[in-house]
Image (cartoon, rainbow, N blue to C red):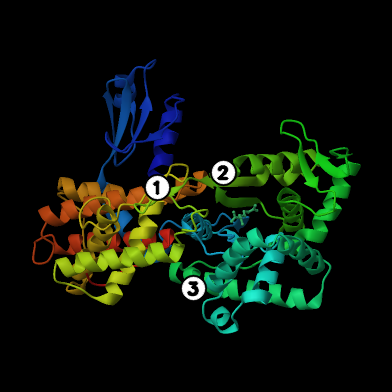
Amino acid sequence: MVLGEIREKVKKELKKLGVEKELKRSEKHGDFFIEAFDLDGEEIAETFKVEGVKAKAEGNYVNFYVDWEYWGKRLLDKVLKEGENYGREKMGKKVVIEYSSPNVAKPMHVGHLRNTILGNSLCRIYEFMGNKVIKINWLGDTGTQFGKLILAYKLWGNEEELEKNPIKELLRVYVKFHEEVEKDPKLEEKAREIYAALEGGKEEFVELWKRFRELSIREFKRIYDLLGAEFDEYTGESYYIEKAKKVVEELKKKGLAYEKEGSVILHVEGVPDTVIMKKDGTTLYLTRDLATAIDRYEKYKFDLMLYVVGSEQKLHFRQLFKTLEAMGYEWAKNCKHISYGLIRLPEGKISTRKGRVITAEEVINRSVEEAGKVMRGIGKFNQEVAEKVGLAAVIYSILKVDPEKFVEFKWEEMLRLKGNTAPYLLYSYVRAKHILDKAELKEFEVKGLKEQERRLLKKLSLFPLVVKEALERNKPNFIANYLYGLCDDFNRFYEECQVLGSEKEEFRVALVSCTKIVLENCFKLLGMPLVEKM
Ligand code: ARG
């Protein structure tokens, strides 16, 4: 890492000068800086000596300016040599990432879409940095609604529809159940019986449940394929029912749970008491999550486990981690909830009650449609490209925002060709590719830099640091924002500096080649599709 190497040299020199200040990264004034309120900045700047780095005392700071004529060649050679491995590290940790986790027989909604896109990018970042990532989809595949679903399907289900459009058909009979139960309350009782029989292992029901589960996964996979998301396991909640019962015993033994009127209540310092086993002996969501975490640790001995789950479950995860800690599991401190906010759609708030759920697939389709409109508008429609642009727009609109903040979808803005949008990024890539299609990489030297060239070199040198920071803070938006800045710097360069046929052609072709490599790396880490033309 060239910038990392430079940083180490600066740090070493500062230490030699007896300056103990944190060396921070700078965007505006040079490449690094230290605060020097209580130091003699002038003196530091004067005595500081590192080849290829200038120190300047400015205000209350000492800023360090990397001389890119000195370091530029080295940077470009490195990027060209390493290619798609530029920025990689060998962290060597075992990381479990649980993400997506939709519910069987229900459509994936926009929340699941944000989840899947965020989780997918985190998996890619961790893998890129040399970790072993275990990707788990914890399907919501249990609960009393399966009693209703089985009954409803037996009464009103259509075999053919189930094969063709499983989730739609299951949703249809589920909605019908809720209508019918108004007229015939006995259905509720029947559904409960069926659920009990299902948990008891009655073959007919288990077979149906399995089918619903398989068919749902098949449908979810359509979206996963589109997004390039993968899973090593689809181990859902149902798998942990029996194990969860054992956890209840363990909690009682450890004095962390007590019985009250037949139910078992969890009592852990620092979080509110809560039921973990109902009177009838059934377990709860939290109980199953406890069993899951323990099982995963036994199985994988992970160094880190991330749960990508919406912010409305913050309390749930605080309870989960606190309880694991209280149970004496030391590794509980290595579990982390990656929380994210809502998506606001122009179509309005999603409401299940009104029976109007906007699915993940509908959102993507809509974006593709809108991308098509924009392309038709400039007389360059191509279905394949529109599909990729539309998908990239959805992914980018989600990832450019800090996970904790809400995302607002505005079709027109998302698909603009200029500004902080996916089409702008894609267009920049196509531009770089277009130049390189007509050029050849030759020997080059770096000298007489123009401002735009210097900025671009600096930006390229930053990539490895940005990926590292994105990983440390679990924020893919760091990479997304970097990518936007890179495109801006590249376009400024493009407008000011002629590449082909100029006297600096060799150097500039190398610079564009490196830009293309880093662009591709960013797209890959975000899980965004690229286009070759636009
Ligand atoms: N299936 C749940 C939902 O769709 C999310 C599961 C989150 N994961 C967990 N380990 N609790 O809301």
The C terminus appears in which quarter of the rendering? bottom left
Amino acid type of the residue that numbered disc 1 sits on in the rendered structure? Val
Residue neighbourhood size for the residue with mark 3, other residues' Cα within 10 Å, grouped as few (<14), some (14–19), many (≥20): few
Callout 3: helix, strand or loop? Answer: helix
Q: Earlier in the sequence, mark 2 or mark 3?
A: 3
Callout 1: helix, strand or loop? Answer: strand
Is 199 or 113 nearer to us in this picture? Answer: 199
Instruction: Using the image, determine if residue 423 lies above or below residue 169.
Output: above
Give the percent coordinates (x, y) of residue 345. 38, 52
Instruction: Using the image, determine if residue 431 lies above or below residue 58.
Output: below
Disc 1 versus disc 2: distance between alpha carbons? 15 Å
Instruction: Using the image, determine if residue 455 lies above or below residue 83.
Output: above
The residue carrying mark 1 is 407
Mark count: 3
Which of the labelled discs sits on residue 312, or is there none? 2
Amino acid type of the residue that numbered disc 3 sits on in the rendered structure? Arg
Q: Residue furthest front?
A: 183
Q: Are marks 2 and 3 in contact (CB under 8 Å)?
A: no
| Residue 396 found in image quarter | bottom left
Q: Earlier in the sequence, mark 3 or mark 1?
A: 3
Q: Earlier in the sequence, mark 1 or mark 2?
A: 2
Which of the labelled discs sits on residue 222, or is there none? 3
Q: Residue at x 78, y 35 (%)?
A: 268
Instruction: Using the image, determine if residue 257 lies above or below residue 444.
Output: above
Is 397 or 529 nearer to us in this picture? Answer: 397
